[in-house]
Amino acid sequence: MRVLGVDPGLTRCGVGVVEGVAGRPLRMLGVGVVRTPADAELGDRLVAIERGIEAWLDEHRPEYVAVERVFSQHNVRTVMGTAQASAVAMLCAARRGLPVALHTPSEVKAAVTGNGRAEKDQVGAMVTRLLRLDAPPKPADAADALALAICHIWRAPAVNRLQQAHAAARASRIPVVRKVTR
């Protein structure tokens, strides 16, 4: 499985590609950050993020895209920028017919470190160990993108089995029509 992880942000949008399957050693294929100037117009920034993500999709041809789920913060402006960058990543994937998975920050931290409240340096250290890198990817947005991809690789098989089980359960239920009398 090849996954593009996206840690959305308007100024720094982390991207990382990981290949592998759950229970086997994983391999990093690329990591980086799509940057936009803070003083640029919003539309121009979103176009720059789109072009950056499209370039990563062209180069690495992932089968899945894992994006950090936007969560509520006190700073509405930050949330809006993150949501807009997230939407661009989802749009790029959808345009290509790629499945998109959204993972919360605590879900990613728990998957990679075993602690849903882990600090950024702990996530970076575990990403470094899991991918057998010489040093943690910098900036933290890049490490977070790799963590998203790792999280998806490890969780996707279980999620797929659950979805299949739910679908089978729904399909096996025969609707019962009962006549109601008063």
Image: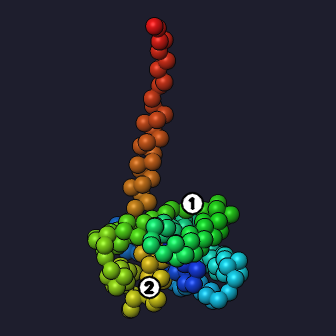
Residue 10: give x, y in percent of width and height: 58, 80
Render colour scheme: rainbow
Q: Residue at x 52, y 80 (%)?
A: 14
Q: Secondary structure at mark 2?
A: helix
Q: Residue at x 43, y 36 (%)?
A: 169
Residue 125 visible here: yes
Dot 2 amino acid type: Ala
Q: Residue at x 31, y 73 (%)?
A: 117
User: Residue 136 vs residue 55: left or right?
Assistant: left
Few, some or many C-alpha atoms within 10 Å of disc 2 (few <14, some 14-19, many ≥20)? some
Residue 6 visible here: no
Image: 20 above or below 159: below
Q: Residue at x 52, y 72 (%)?
A: 76
Q: Quadrant of the C terminus?
A: top left
Near-viewer residue (11 or 139): 11
Q: CA distance from mark 1 to mark 2?
A: 25 Å
User: Residue 36 vs residue 17: left or right?
Assistant: right
Q: Secondary structure at mark 1?
A: loop
Residue 141: give x, y in percent of width and height: 47, 82
Residue 12 picture quarter: bottom right
Q: Residue furthest bottom?
A: 134
Residue 88: give x, y in percent of width and height: 63, 70
- Mark 1 vs mark 2: give the one in front: 2
Residue 50 picture quarter: bottom right
Q: Which residue is mark 1?
A: 99
Q: Which residue is mark 2?
A: 140
Q: Residue furthest left?
A: 114
The first of marks 1 and 2 along the sequence is 1
Few, some or many C-alpha atoms within 10 Å of disc 1 (few <14, some 14-19, many ≥20)? few
Near-viewer residue (1 or 54): 54
